[in-house]
Image (cartoon, rainbow, N blue to C red):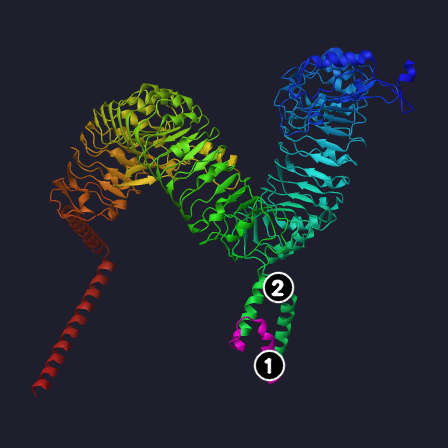
Amino acid sequence: MLLLGCLYNGELCMSCSESERLALVKFKAGLQDPHQLLSSWEGDDCCTWAGVHCDNETWHVVSLDLQYHHLYHGLSNGGRLSDEINPSLLSLKHLNHLDLSSNHFKGTEIPSFIGSLTGLSYLNLSNAGFIGRVPPQLGNLTSLIYLDLNSFYSMHDLHVDDNFQWLSFLSSLQYLDMSGVNLAKISSDNLFHAVNMLPALSVLILPNCHLHWPQPSSSSSSSSSSLYLNLSNSLTTIDLSNNQINSTFPLWLTNSSRLVYLDLWFNHFHGVIPEAIGQMKSLEVIQLGFNHFVGPLPTSIRDLCNLHTLDFSFNNLSEDTSTLSRIFSGCAGDTIETLNLRNSKLKGELSGWLGMLKAIITLDLSKNSFYGPIPISIGNLSNLRTLYLTSNRFNGSLPESFGQLSELKILDISYNSISGVISQLLWVQPIFAIFYILYLLLFLINSTIGGAPVVRFLLKFGQLVPDKKGFILNSRIVLRDLWRSFHQQHFANLSSLDTLSMSYNPLVVNISRDWVPPFHLLEIALVSCQLGPEFPAWLRTQKDYSVLDLSNTGITGSLPDWFWDLPHSIALLDLSNNQITGTIPKSLKFFSLCLINLRSNKFEGPLPPLPSNALYGDLSDNSFSGDLLPILGENIPTLGHLYLSNNLLNGMLSASICNFQLMQVIDISNNFISGELPGCWQNLFFLVALNLANNKIYGEIPVSLGSLKLIEVLHLGNNNLSGEIPLPLRNCKILVTLDLGGNKLSGNIPAWIGESMPLLRILRLRANMLQGDIPGELSNLASLQILDLANNNLSGVIPQSFGNLSAMQLTNEARQSILDGFHGLVITSIGNYSISGYTDSLSVITKGMELEYSKTLEFVTSMDLSSNQLSGEIPQQLGNLNGIQNLNLSGNHLIGGIPDSIGDLVSLESFDLSRNELSGKIPPSISFLTSLSHLNLSYNNLWGRIPTGNQLQTLDDPSIYIGNRDLCGPPLTVKCGHNETLAFGVEGDDSDENETLWLLFGGAVGYALGLWAVCICLFIKEAWRNSYFDVVDYMHKKLLAFTATSIYNSAGVKDEIDG
């Protein structure tokens, strides 16, 4: 009866054994299962449970597949299996397949008891959160065919100890993936020996394993000979990418006849890729990118007739395109589907070899030195789907043949010099084209033989032309319209296009308002192309784009109403650097925008509320008004960058700013913000730059700003802040810019600024009420390049140690940009669509005027101590500051002379010592300042001749020296006296009387000495004496005869006149 009860529809009902069921129940009990992935593990028949598979005959459990993605098919990545792997699995004596991959076992080690499941032929523990040592007991799994320990995506440290011998016991192994497992402790000899003991191995995947082969030397042939794999006929795949292998191309690889996939990407391979690579006839994929290979490229690649993927990107090939022509003229040109040559230092034109890539699907030639026009033959690449030509030197117009690439999905030609007009296809009816051909033929006949019937025929068909004012006008209209029809075909058949980037080319995109494009774009980037003045109407047809970058495209006027019906998928919107007017609707907050950049336009009205998932918002350089509440009053937990500078904003900066705990940059400078600063800055742990300059903020500087341990830029200048500089600011140890100028701060300059801020490059405290001495500790700031303490009540002397400011001693030094590393991170995080991020700026008083520096700020070196109460002499040590460009010590009580060392300031462009009590002569060395373009020494007690020469010749404004009553010489009208000595003679100096006297005296002495030498010679040499006097007698007779003749002729002429 029991047996009959198990029969159903003529089949015998069986279930797993009780012991195996209990083992699985115990295994489940040790797991955490928040998504109830194992909710089906109930009842008596464990063979029906999720992930459990039984043998069809014995009903023993043979497979346990608990891979997360096999159990859960939703979008969430949470709820993975975790916690403990119970040893009860050892009761599954017939288990041959175990997959625990893509779960999260919370950093536990791989259980060593798995090595006792000797029946396993398949083991997958990849990306399951395991850490620690890979148990050598896995070597007991001698039946194992497939082993996957990939931990590349689990972000945990899984490693192998120096003993890798256990791997060699897996004699049946065909597939080995240890991606991300740290093998740094394994010597290259042990690694190669273990792998060579696997005769059946077909797939070897070891990327990101910290492999480091020693560079073989010619003197150690025995050791280097062991560094090879015994490439049996079974090995088809080798992946050694993303390691630290420093070697030439391994020649033993070329011995493989069956190798299909070779990936050496992202290592330190160098030298030439050998021609022997052409022997690997089965190769389908070659990935050698991100190495240091050099040219020439092996032309034998042309014979790899199975090759479909070739990656030589980011190498130093330095090849021209003639080699590419030879390579792709072979059978490889017929099979290549993916070609990546990005940033490989290639040069030449595309014509001659591009058309050989008959099967190409993905082509990346970006960041090279290719030049010339894009060839028309590109239209023949009928399978092309992805094309990157960015950052080259292509010129000419975009060929019309692009319209033939019906499979093209991604087109990126940005950062080139491609010019011309981009237009849509105007549909041409076949009858119109036929008429045009017939028109030309008949026009030729009419012009040749004449005849009214021909003219009447043309006029009859001329009714197809809208305007019928005459035969000549019709012909021009026909010619114009047909030319447009045939010429403007760039987007004719690009129905598959979803990414279009033509940024930074001098292109004019001239498309009619009623054009309906054949494509639906996901990403649109047309930066610095000419689209305007009207907003492109064809964008109304694009409903699904996630990226729209139309910055600097000449768009003016207001945006159409339909524009703000943005796609819900939009993530990046950049309309910056245009002349767009109008207001921004409140509906902006309902979109999924992560980055919005509307800077440098003419938007007005209140600030728009930003989307709740915004990361980056730039609304600066507009005319927004009102308070900050539309943004700061919203819950935007992801916001990291907020730029609102140069608007008309008012109101207070409320404490709600501190709710944005991921904020990295806040720039609300150049507005009308008032009130006191909030005191909650300790909540903004990640803040790097805070710029509130040029507002109306009052009160004291909050001490909580000292909690910003990561801050690099702090601008609070030109407000109404009072009190002293708070002591907690010394905790901001990585400050690069500290600008507190233009306030009402009092007290002394803290000495701890020079002790606690070693990276400080800009210190601006000008125009406050600071007093006391200038602390000498400021000279410890080795990176300081701008020091502005002007317009305070500082007293004492200028510290001599200021001559040790290292950054001001450097000449022609390429300094890192302010916040350069941080700026780079911002650019990377948003891709190539919008070069955004914080750029520091500062106003510097130099050359007698206020100049704003931004992009070139890192090149400015300046010291301004003007308008204080400083006394004493100018330190001679300031002459060590060879790299300083602006030195202003005016408006103090400095005494003594101008030090001669000033002539060593070879980079000095602006020098102001006016309104002091300096005395003595102007040092002649000042004429050595060849870069000097602004000089002011007025209102001192200087005397003597003004030096001239070199750059001083161009500084001819007398006001430079006004107020010094005892100065003389050009450019002053006061002449120097007879007893005035020349301060310094250089080429081009004016001579004075003393110089003339010395010149006359030297000439007289020279003449006397010369005459005396001649007389001595004549006295000693009789022959010379006789010859000399013979010549004198002869000249005397000639002179008498000439005189007599002249008198006689004159008398004769007079007689004739009288007669």
Q: Quadrant of residue 584?
A: top left
**Which of the marked residues, 2 or 1, is nearer the chain's N terminus?**
2
Q: Secondary structure at mark 2?
A: loop
Viewer-proximal residue, 445 or 47?
47
Look at the image and give the residue range highlighted in magenta: 447-473
Residue farthest along the left direction in this orientation: 1058
What residue lies at 67% left-to-right and 39% top-to-bottom? 273
Q: Main secondary structure of the magenta part?
A: helix
Circle on res. 505: none
Residue holding disc 1: 456
Q: Quadrant of residue 742?
A: top left
Instruction: Examine the structure image and report whether residue 459 is included in the region drawn in magenta.
Output: yes
Left or right: 390 as drawn, with respect to 167: left
Left or right: 342 as drawn, with respect to 39: left
Quadrant location of the N terminus in the rendered image: top right
Quadrant location of the C terminus in the rendered image: bottom left
Residue farthest along the bottom direction in this orientation: 1059
Residue holding disc 2: 428
- Measured as percent of width and height from the top left, residue 474 is found at 54, 74
**Residue 623 in the image: above or below residue 325:** above
Viewer-proximal residue, 638 or 200?
638
- Measured as percent of width and height from the top left, residue 884 is found at 32, 35
